[in-house]
Image: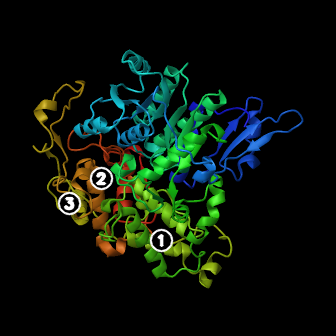
């Protein structure tokens, strides 16, 4: 294709692939626009109606504008390397492996040695090989040296490359860039530190190696990318971005007549990041070391003849994978037929037992076990953000026509809640349902009488918490003020009769609710760590809401899935101490206005709107 990709911009393509799978409800399009093509053409809706990724180029001579879209094709090892001759590495050359003390680095060091390489340099940030590695090096018929370098530092890389010659090693003929790092987060949660940690070794490291290798007669420059860049693994947007850069950089080098290939590896058996993370093999089986090495040999043997600088080596189970994806991306369309049998019956042909089996089965597959109580909230049984995306995608891919929100775990926090919701979406359509939805509503709002079905309150001054006592206190004019309780804060430390003293209070009395610290988090399913990160207003709001519903005749069970809205008036927040605790995973929602109403709606499993409204004094 005319006009090679700009590698740094390719990071956005990798990030977008992950974001699409995290948020299938949004349409995310990446368009590579050539220098001669106006941006207006790229913004035409019909251009990206079907495709998610496009390259637009001005045609040559009489040819018109070209609109190109990527497609994945399958190639066998025999097609990649016809003839099957084993590689032989020169004895009078050196070979560099970054990430050299990692499991994959060591595997490829032995592979190079078995292929005849006599001089192998392993580059690592630590530079300290384990004792068993040192013994393994001695068994090789090669000189293996270990070099300490931060691959993201150009100074370190140049110093490392220069040290090879000083040690009497011959010129470098091959580089394997296997260094990498993980810092998994959903795209919306990524911060600069998460991006830097993952991008630095792959992006800056590759640029540094490219710079340091300038002028060398390299036989190969192999970049170890990941299948994550191809598929857009949820919660690995930064990792997808980093590896997409490697893929584009390989094309960039080839466009300048320099050797390069980027290999999108699937997970390896027993070694590598996937093995350490314990990833499942439901949709992508792990590569045996012997098969991975054979693929590497075939790729390097035919690298100059490859039509592209990027090759994916992975054992993908297409049926299972397509079932997990929220929708089949166009670039995988050639494999869609393999997934056709993974799609279940269309909406209306399910039984309730079908839905139960699919939900429980999908959850078991994602968790890797069936040792869970279906009535326990999904997040408490181990479904984190990444697993939650996989779970949602599995369900959505298994049921034709089913659309599930990215907030699935919050909207339907338990298995029964989720089953009930999905059943309303995919179950048989009754005649009454058709009649009810047969036409638009006519007229304005329906007038209905309202009634207070239940009330609850918390009273100051030692009064009981019964609404009747609250009324009697108001009528009698009783003064409920008291001195500051000793368990609130140190009054002497904050009192100052001067009203203008900063950070001080000029009063010693107030109207204080008793027992504010006696919130029963276990009863409401709130873990201790989360309870510590909640403003006491949330404790009280949850208790009072529950008491009011019980007073109106509801039980904890009948509140579940109730079509009930939560509306809270609140003007200020302030806990038992003037300081908000150190930021943690629960702090944001625990000290937010939206958390007041949202906490009630989520904890009691309501199915209605929730709003916290600040109208100043009338909210307090």
Name the residue tied to disc 2: 538
Residue 321 is situated, as x and y percent measured from the top left of the image, at: 52, 61
Residue 493 can be seen in this image: yes
Q: Nearer the viewer, mark 1 or mark 3?
A: 1
Name the residue tied to disc 1: 421
Tell me where residue 200 sits by quadrant. top left
Distance from Cα at disc 1 to Cα at disc 3? 29 Å
> 363 and 375: which one is in front?
363
Classify mark 2: residues with Cα within 10 Å, few (<14), some (14-19) or many (20+). many
Classify mark 3: residues with Cα within 10 Å, few (<14), some (14-19) or many (20+). few
Q: Which of marks 2 and 1 is in front?
A: 1
Name the residue tied to disc 3: 520
The answer to whether residue 254 is above or below residue 389 is: above
The answer to whether residue 403 is above or below residue 570 is: below
Residue 390 is situated, as x and y percent measured from the top left of the image, at: 46, 58
Q: Residue reaching furthest right? A: 62
Secondary structure of residue under mark 2 = helix
């Amino acid at each position: 294709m005319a006009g090679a990709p700009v590698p740094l911009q390719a990071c956005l393509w990798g990030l977008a692939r992950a974001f699409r799978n995290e948020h299938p409800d949004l349409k995310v399009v990446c368009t590579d626009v050539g220098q001669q093509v106006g941006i207006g053409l790229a913004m035409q809706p019909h251009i990206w109606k079907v495709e998610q990724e496009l390259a637009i180029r001005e045609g040559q001579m009489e040819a018109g504008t070209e609109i190109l879209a990527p497609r994945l094709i399958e190639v066998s090892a025999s097609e990649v390397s016809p003839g099957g001759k084993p590689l032989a590495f020169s004895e009078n050359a050196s070979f560099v492996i970054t990430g050299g003390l990692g499991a994959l680095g060591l595997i490829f060091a032995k592979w190079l040695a078995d292929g005849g390489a006599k001089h192998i340099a392993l580059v690592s940030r630590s530079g300290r090989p384990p004792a068993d590695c040192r013994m393994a090096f001695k068994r090789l018929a090669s000189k293996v040296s270990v070099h300490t370098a931060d691959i993201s530092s150009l100074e370190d890389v140049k110093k490392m490359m220069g040290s090879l010659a000083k040690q009497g090693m011959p010129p470098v003929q091959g580089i394997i860039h296997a260094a990498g790092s993980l810092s998994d987060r959903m795209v919306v949660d990524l911060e600069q530190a998460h991006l830097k940690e993952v991008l630095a070794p792959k992006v800056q490291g590759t640029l540094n190696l490219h710079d340091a290798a300038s002028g060398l007669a390299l036989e190969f420059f192999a970049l170890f990318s990941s299948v994550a860049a191809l598929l857009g693994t949820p919660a690995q947007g930064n990792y997808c971005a980093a590896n997409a850069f490697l893929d584009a950089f390989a094309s960039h080098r080839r466009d300048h007549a320099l050797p390069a290939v980027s290999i999108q590896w699937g997970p390896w058996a027993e070694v590598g990041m996937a093995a350490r993370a314990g990833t499942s093999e439901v949709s992508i089986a792990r590569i045996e070391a012997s098969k991975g090495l054979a693929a590497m040999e075939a790729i390097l043997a035919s690298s100059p003849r490859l039509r592209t600088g990027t090759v994916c080596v992975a054992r993908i189970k297409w049926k299972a994978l397509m079932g997990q994806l929220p929708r089949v991306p166009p670039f995988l369309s050639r494999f869609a037929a393999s997934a056709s049998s993974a799609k279940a019956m269309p909406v209306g042909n399910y039984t309730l037992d079908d839905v139960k089996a699919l939900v429980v089965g999908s959850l078991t597959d994602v968790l890797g076990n069936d040792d869970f109580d279906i009535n326990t909230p999904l997040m408490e049984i181990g479904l984190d953000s990444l697993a939650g995306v996989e779970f949602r995608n599995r369900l959505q891919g298994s049921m034709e026509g089913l659309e599930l929100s990215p907030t699935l775990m919050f909207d339907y926090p338990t298995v029964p809640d989720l089953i009930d919701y999905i059943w309303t979406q995919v179950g048989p359509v009754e005649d009454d349902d058709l009649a009810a939805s047969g036409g638009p509503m006519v007229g304005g709002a329906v007038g209905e009488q309202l009634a207070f079905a239940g009330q609850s309150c918390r009273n100051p001054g030692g009064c009981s918490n019964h609404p009747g006592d609250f009324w009697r206190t108001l009528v009698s004019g009783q003064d409920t003020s008291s001195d500051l309780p000793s368990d609130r804060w140190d009054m002497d430390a904050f009192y100052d009769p001067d009203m203008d003293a900063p950070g001080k209070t000029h009063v010693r009395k107030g109207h204080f609710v008793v027992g504010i610290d006696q919130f029963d988090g276990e009863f409401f399913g709130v873990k201790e760590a989360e309870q510590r990160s909640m403003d006491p207003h949330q404790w009280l709001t949850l208790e009072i809401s529950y008491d009011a519903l019980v007073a109106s005749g509801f039980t904890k069970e009948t509140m579940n899935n109730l079509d009930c809205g939560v509306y809270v008036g609140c003007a200020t927040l302030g806990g038992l101490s003037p300081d908000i605790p150190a930021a943690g995973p629960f702090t944001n929602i625990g000290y937010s206005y939206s958390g007041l109403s949202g906490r009630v709606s989520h904890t009691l499993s309501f199915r209605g709107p929730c709003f916290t409204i600040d109208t100043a004094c009338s909210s307090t």
